[in-house]
């Protein structure tokens, strides 16, 4: 019944899994009139209570559907335009409202990859160090790169420099 369907919007992403696989395809993000932009919806989807999420691999004609366990997602890459260098994209949500990117750092992840960017998590002025931002983040946190955003599962951050 169409009245019970939830409007979604496909967003093209790359997903990096704990077993080393990299999947390119589309996540289906629930449209919410209270938020704007792909980053907001992506963070909301990854940080919600569901353990499994649908994912379409391949092009629209030949796509096959998978169900992904969030525990095995190391990071999700979303290419977005960054307005000004050092300025994060609009991030609005319970945790990210008013978030400011911290200093540029290198995050080493459990799959052996590295990300250079700024952790964008809201913290009070007294907790503005990158380590404070990591400790205050929800399950997934945005890392602003020069060419886009990676949303990283916090438990897969092994070290930061």
Image (tube, grey):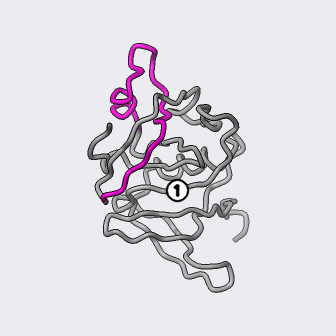
Q: Position of residue 59 (x, y in %)?
A: 64, 79
Horizontal placement of 113 versus 97: left or right?
left
136 or 75: nearer the viewer: 75
Tag count in the figure? 1
Q: In the image, is residue 7 above or below residue 129?
A: below
Q: Which residues are magenta?
A: 112-137
The stretch drawn in magenta includes residue 129? yes
Q: Position of residue 34 (x, y in %)?
A: 69, 39
Q: Position of residue 159 (x, y in %)?
A: 27, 42
Q: Secondary structure at mark 1?
A: strand
Residue at coordinates 50% horizontally, 32% vertically from top-left? 95
Residue bearing mark 1: 77
Q: Position of residue 110 (x, y in %)?
A: 28, 55
Residue ranking furthest to the top: 126
58 or 83: nearer the viewer: 83
Residue at coordinates 44% horizontally, 69% vertically from top-left? 22
Q: Dividing the picture into quarters, in which one does residue 8 lie?
A: bottom right
150 or 71: nearer the viewer: 150
Horizontal placement of 63 versus 133: left or right?
right
The stretch drawn in magenta includes residue 52? no
On the rendered image, what quadrant is the N terminus found in?
bottom right
Q: Residues within 10 Å of mark 1 (few under 14, many from 20)?
A: some
Residue at coordinates 34% horizontally, 58% vertically from top-left? 71
């Amino acid at each position: 019944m169409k009245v019970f369907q939830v409007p979604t919007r496909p967003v093209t992403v790359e997903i990096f899994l704990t077993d080393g696989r990299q999947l390119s395809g589309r996540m289906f993000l629930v449209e919410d009139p209270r938020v704007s932009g792909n980053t907001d919806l992506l963070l909301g989807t990854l940080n919600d209570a569901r353990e499994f999420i649908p994912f379409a691999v391949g092009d629209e004609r030949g796509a096959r559907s998978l169900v992904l366990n969030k525990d095995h997602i190391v990071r999700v890459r979303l290419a977005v335009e960054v307005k000004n260098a050092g300025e994060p994209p609009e991030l609005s949500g319970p945790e990210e409202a008013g978030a400011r990117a911290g200093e540029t750092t290198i995050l080493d992840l459990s799959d052996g990859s590295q990300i250079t960017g700024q952790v964008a998590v809201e913290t009070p002025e007294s907790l503005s160090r990158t380590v404070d931002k990591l400790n205050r983040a929800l399950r997934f946190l945005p890392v602003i790169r020069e060419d886009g955003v990676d949303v990283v599962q916090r438990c897969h951050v092994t070290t930061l420099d």
